[in-house]
Amino acid sequence: MGVRRRAVLAGSVAATLGAPAIVAAQGTAWPHGAIRFVVPFPPGGSTDPITRIIQAKLIELNGWNVVVDNKPGGTGVVGAAIAAKAPPDGQTWLFVFDSHVLNPLWTPNLPYRDAELMPVMQIGRSAQGIAAYPTRPYKSFAEVITAAKASPGTISVGALAASLAQIYLAFLQKENGFQVNTIPYKGGGPLFQDALGGVVDVSISSLANMMPHVRAGKLKLIGVTGEKRSALAPDTPTLAEQGVKAPPSYAWWGVYAPAGTPAPIVARMHEAITKAVRTADVTQKFVEQFDMEVVLSAPDAFAALVRQEQELWGKVIRDNNLKPE
């Protein structure tokens, strides 16, 4: 997203999301009681710590009672269903990773409908990283492609199952005419266990999860998927710089609310999260720990992103007959 686009979004948010300090919700001042942030993943990873950083800052700035409720299962489906069925009174919010928008594409019989959740905001985004086991000969992803063309299907690449990384890898193969052996993993723990053990030759994941292993010398970063190099790894070229046919791709984090949550409450929470994330110490943590480009989009812009992602990656899933495992 360009600077001009972000500036327009920022102006839109400022113009449309002004909200009074006290909001009426079903005849009661909001918030009334504990605010629940549902995280559809276990502690660890990136979504949980990002949510907890925001939680702590909201408590500090507003004195609210905010609790994080981890509800893992089914690549985020279990937690999303809980949030979707919650009363739309502003007391329940869902914090998601980008895989959330893929669930309707993978799973025909979700325990909730997409329409039962309303997009509130994209918090931020981060490029994905591609890394090789240190003893493998690849110095760039372009070299992986060359080797894969010479010996199709022999290079193993680990990626989270039912994730944007898995879909993006399929897209790269089709666009660039090579074939690898994609190994889907149920979670980041098993993925990195095998990546660090050399069980897979290459792995793809968010830079937020990958960089600690790269810094420790346990993985060799050979490419990033953003439109520009990452500040966390300025010496690693983007895929485009390597001559790979690839649009920029980002991991991202966002917030939803149960459909029907009153607009003034959504505006107030958007305003509160925006203020919390723009606090210098929170922004610094997000940049340094997660390589995050802070976005803080308006609800309509976030909804447009969701539609765009589902359309683009849905086509890749169908064209390649991908399965979430």
Image (spheres, rainbow, N blue to C red):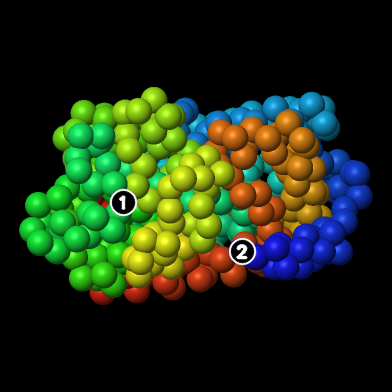
Which residue sits at x=70%, y=68%?
5
Q: What amino acid is labelled 2 in the image? A: Met
Q: Quadrant of the N terminus?
A: bottom right
Task: Report whether residue 88 is seen.
Answer: no
Q: What amino acid is labelled 1 in the image? A: Ser
Which residue sits at x=27%, y=63%?
170
Task: Report whether residue 227 is seen.
Answer: yes
Residue 121, compared with residue 283, is above or below; it is below
Which residue sits at x=62%, y=44%?
93
Among the two numbered marks 1 and 2 on one chain, the one whose residue lies closer to the N terminus: 2
Label 1: element kind: loop
Judge depth for marks 1 and 2 and give the one in front. Answer: 1
248 relative position to 191: left or right: right
Label 2: element kind: loop
Marks 1 and 2 sit apart, C-alpha to C-alpha, by 25 Å
Residue 113, compared with residue 202, is above or below; it is below
Residue at the disc numbered 2: 1
Residue 132 location, quadrant:
top left
* Residue 141 in the image, given as x and y percentages of width and height: 30, 54
